[in-house]
Image (cartoon, coloured by chain):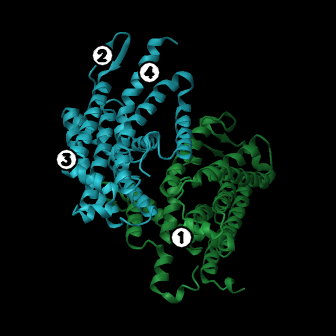
Chain colours: A green, B cyan
């Protein structure tokens, strides 16, 4: 099992475990919230990486899976009265179903056409849910406070969701590694390099692409349910925020697309930068630095694309050839 | 429902639709010449809005005069954006150009939000209304549609009758061959990108004369441009005008039949369906 001797995997796992377990041992509620946000970002980036990094399809609609999964889960919790674990699974299944249907349709498009279609899908989903009465239309779904009772009250429920998120984040890293090192993953990467050639070599590309899309959708759907359960309500604007898809793209670019470690590093780095900017007291002229968060992310992304398109991991691999074998 | 209000809604929609069309034309030109989807288009539309708004409301310049200034600034901005992003990555995968133009979008929107906040603005400009029989139309929309048609004709004259315009078409047809004929391809690409963003800025400026807007409004119109571009065929400037008319008619007529909030749902579903069924658009764009 030489494939398990992989520095990238173990580094990524170590980081997620350290980050995830820190607030559990210190029982620190504010640290838990900070870690929650980062873990959420790691799950989103790692799962998007399956489509974008491995398969080479840029999707601006990744947040649809998170939002729709969240809505399905919240609906199951509030209207059907399902327990949380079942609702989380329902969220994942809902996203996977949507990904399957969408994949069958829009994955026939290639390159920029696909990217455009995903923007359309995101908007269609958001505007549709904002009009869809069972999902509360524009006001969304709000949970009754009593829903937290079976989980030992709201405080305990927050910790419970956190444990689940840590578990999902660890799973997301393992999952992304397993896919990359499978025959299926090899197929995806050959699609990224040359789709026609991949087809000639016997990869059933429509099926492989749809499968990648479905696999990338499950975890965001589950984590969406958990996030909105923790929040107590879900609204169309929060659930289908195009900016969240874009942030996931930036994280992947930052860390290095198509690698297991990259999205984890990128998510950590991006969230760290974001918190620093949002909480800093420095100001440019009369404007506080936190107003420039978007500008700085934009400049950062442009610089990465222009000068280090491989991201941090790609740069390390290029710079130190000996790392190539161990850094996946 | 009487015929009068039906026709008024339709004409109103069509007038706004041609203005959307000109933004989409810019997007189409850029796609047609260099196979780049410009995700900074919406940000430039928003800048065009604020350009006209600031020149008119703060400095008191006539909005249509301001529009000329905004157009020139849009052209220059486009050339700058080109050299900052795509100019360095002409043969890069589409992923890079998408993300590069998107990062420009983030920078412009970020700066704009810091400078103007996201509160809604209204130019408060009005030319009264024209009464044509039973119809009442806002003059600002009539003028906007007229200017759009003028700009479109000028673009066609430029592309078909002038030397730089012919260069643009040559590069768009076959860049390698054009280069062999001594056409400075990279400068022509920069010019095309500049004209594309200029059209976006003009569209934004015109929209600002009859709608209120925020710095984030550009996003909405960018998405409309995508819908229109795909309707008419990406890479086909005239198709954009047709697409704009179709979208305008839909926006004028659909609210009569269903709640207003359903209109974008229909638009985007239509968008995805057209991408699936006929990605080359109704008039057939360039592959």
* Res. B9 mark: 4
Q: A222 or A100: nearer the eye? A: A100
Classify residue A7 by image quadrant. Answer: bottom right
Q: A288 or B60: nearer the eye? A: B60
Q: How far separated are the C-alphas under marks 4 and 1?
A: 50 Å
The image position of residue A250, as x and y in percent, is 48, 63
Task: Specify the quadrant that holds the C terminus of chain A.
Answer: bottom right
Task: Specify the quadrant that holds the N terminus of chain A.
Answer: bottom right
Residue with the mark numbered 3:
B162
Q: How far separated are the C-alphas under marks 2 and 4?
A: 14 Å
Going from N to C along the chain, the mark reached first, 3 or 4, is: 4
Side of A120 relative to A137 (left or right): left
To the question of a shared chain for discs 3 and 1, the answer is no
To the question of a shared chain for discs 4 and 1, the answer is no
* Res. B130 mark: 2
The image position of residue B32, as x and y in percent, is 37, 51
Going from N to C along the chain, the mark reached first, 2 or 4, is: 4
Q: Nearer the viewer, mark 3 or mark 4?
A: 3
């Amino acid at each position: 099992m030489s494939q398990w001797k992989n520095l990238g995997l173990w580094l990524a796992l170590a980081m997620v475990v350290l980050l995830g377990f820190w607030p559990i041992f210190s029982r620190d509620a504010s640290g838990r919230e900070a870690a929650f946000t980062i873990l959420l970002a790691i799950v989103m980036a790692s799962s998007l990486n399956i489509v974008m990094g491995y398969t080479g399809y840029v999707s601006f609609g990744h947040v649809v899976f998170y939002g729709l999964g969240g809505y399905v889960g919240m609906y199951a919790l509030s209207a059907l009265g399902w327990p949380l674990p079942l609702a989380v699974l329902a969220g994942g299944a809902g996203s996977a179903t949507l990904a399957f249907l969408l994949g069958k349709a829009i994955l026939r498009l290639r390159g920029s056409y696909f990217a455009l279609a995903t923007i359309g899908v995101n908007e269609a989903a958001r505007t549709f849910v904002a009009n869809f009465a069972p999902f509360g239309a524009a006001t969304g779904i709000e949970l009754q406070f009593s829903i937290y009772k079976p989980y030992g009250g709201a405080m305990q429920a927050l910790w419970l969701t956190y444990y689940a998120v840590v578990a999902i984040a660890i799973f997301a890293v393992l999952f992304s590694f397993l896919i990359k090192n499978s025959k299926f993953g090899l197929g995806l990467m050959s699609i990224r390099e040359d789709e026609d050639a991949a087809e000639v070599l016997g990869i059933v590309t429509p099926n492989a692409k749809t499968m990648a899309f479905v696999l990338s959708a499950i975890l965001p759907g589950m984590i969406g349910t958990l996030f909105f359960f923790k929040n107590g309500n879900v609204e169309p604007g929060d659930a289908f925020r195009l900016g969240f898809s874009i942030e996931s793209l930036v994280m992947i670019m930052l860390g290095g697309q198509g690698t297991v470690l990259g999205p984890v590093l990128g998510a950590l780095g991006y969230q760290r930068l974001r918190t620093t900017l949002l909480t800093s007291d420095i100001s440019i002229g009369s404007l506080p630095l936190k107003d420039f968060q978007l500008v700085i992310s934009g400049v950062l992304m442009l610089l990465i694309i222009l000068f280090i398109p491989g991201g941090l991991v790609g740069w390390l691999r290029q710079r130190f050839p000996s790392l190539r074998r161990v850094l996946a | 429902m009487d015929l009068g209000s039906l026709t008024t809604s339709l004409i109103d929609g069509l007038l706004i639709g041609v203005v959307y069309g000109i933004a989409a034309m810019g997007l189409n030109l850029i796609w047609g010449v260099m196979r780049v989807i410009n995700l900074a288009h919406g940000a430039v539309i928003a800048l065009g809005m604020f350009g006209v708004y600031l020149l008119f409301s703060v400095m008191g310049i006539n909005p249509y005069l301001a529009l000329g200034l905004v157009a020139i600034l849009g052209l220059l901005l486009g050339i700058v954006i080109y050299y900052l992003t795509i100019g360095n990555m002409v043969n890069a995968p589409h992923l890079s150009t998408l993300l590069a133009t998107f990062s420009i979008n983030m920078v412009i929107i970020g700066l704009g939000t810091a400078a103007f906040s996201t509160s809604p603005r209204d130019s408060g400009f009005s030319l009264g209304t024209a009464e044509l029989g039973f119809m009442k139309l806002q003059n600002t929309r009539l003028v906007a549609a007229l200017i759009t048609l003028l700009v479109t004709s000028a673009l066609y004259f430029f592309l078909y009758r002038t030397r730089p315009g012919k260069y643009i078409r040559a590069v768009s047809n076959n860049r390698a061959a054009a280069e062999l004929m001594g056409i400075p391809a990279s400068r022509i690409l920069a010019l095309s990108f500049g004209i594309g963003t200029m059209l976006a800025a003009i569209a934004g400026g015109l929209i600002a004369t009859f709608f209120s807007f925020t710095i984030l409004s550009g996003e909405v119109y960018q998405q409309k441009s995508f819908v229109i571009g795909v309707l008419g065929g990406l890479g086909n400037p005239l198709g954009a005008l047709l697409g704009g008319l179709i979208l305008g008619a839909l926006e004028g007529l659909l609210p009569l039949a269903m709640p207003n909030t359903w209109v974008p749902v229909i638009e985007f579903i239509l968008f995805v369906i057209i991408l699936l069924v006929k990605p080359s658009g109704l008039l057939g764009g360039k592959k």
